[in-house]
Image (spheres, helix red, strand yellow):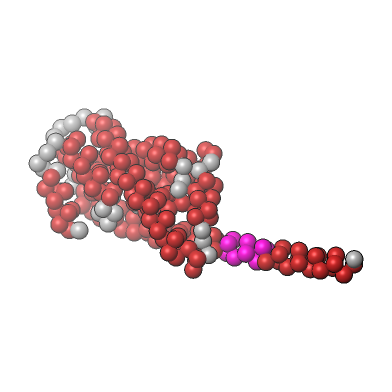
Amino acid sequence: MNTIISWLEALSQQIPVTWFVLIGSLVEEIIAPIPSPLVMMLGGSISAGQGSPLIFICVLALIGALSKTLGSLIIYFISDKAEDVIIDKFGRFLGISHSDTEGLGKYFGQGKRDDITIFLMRAIPVMPTAPVSVIAGLIKIDLKTYLMSTFLGLILRNLIYLYLGYTSLGALESLSGGFDSLEKVGYLILAIFGGIVLLWMYRKRRQGSVLTMIDSLTNKVTRVLKKKSR
């Protein structure tokens, strides 16, 4: 991972900053362990060093958001396919079916509340983006909702990082390290959230099975009583 980070830092000095943000954002999104502030804060720092006006970071924010959205779409589709394999092989042990995960995605894919939720998860700097893409693909969140909210949220997130990089040349390394540490907390939050969702789905599945058994037993008793009454 350090090799990839060193390569990105070297790349930033070899190509125009717009191309660096485009390529770096895609690599950063797909290779999740790379600190998410790296590309944008470095891009902002380079822009300031080259004397670009502050408004230029808006252009970089759009380029980075487009590239990261493409990367998140790739992760979404990979996770979508992985869900089929995981449920087919391990779903019976977890008590989870395809209809459970797809139903959860439909639940989260309705209304402005869900658009805002995805937007905030993308926009908040300490929230890692790749795990959000993985979860969205696994539960099959509506693609239109996912892409639009992702793109808009990433624009705001990128602007924050770019501005910090643009205005804090001397403190770039310490700021990046601080956000990287906070992002680890974001990973923990998402891991806990994922565990809660799995537990909820498992319990709901089990409750459904128990209710089905009770209903079946009730029907059998009813049929027996009707026969005796005759």
Is 208 part of what is drawn in magenta? yes
Query: Is residue 211 left or right of 17 when viewed as pictured?
Result: right
Measuring from the top left, give residue 88's x and y in whole percent. 44, 61
- The secondary structure that dominates the magenta segment is helix
Q: Toward the viewer: 216 or 90?
A: 216
Tell me if I can see residue 189 in this picture.
Answer: no
Instruction: Give the vertical position of 30 relative to 43 (above or below).
Output: below
Q: Nearer the viewer, residue 158 or 110?
A: 110
Q: Nearer the viewer, residue 160 or 120?
A: 120
- Which residue appears at 43% of the width and 37% of the height? 144
Percent x, y of residue 38: 23, 49
Q: Residue at x 24, y 31 (%)?
A: 56
- At 50% from the left edge and 66% from the top edge, which residue is drawn? 92
Extreme residue toward the right, this view = 230
Q: Quadrant of the C terminus?
A: bottom right
Indicate the quadrant where residue 166 lies.
top left
Residue range highlighted in magenta: 203-212
Q: Is residue 36 magenta?
A: no
In the rendered image, residue 140, in percent from the top left (x then y), is placed at 45, 48
Above or below: residue 216 compared with residue 149: below
User: In the image as oriented, which residue stretches furthest toward the left?
Assistant: 14
Depth check, front residue: 168 or 104: 104
Across and down, in percent, residue 154 comes to 35, 41
Q: Is residue 208 visible?
A: yes
Which residue is drawn at the image coordinates 20% and 42% (left, top)? 23
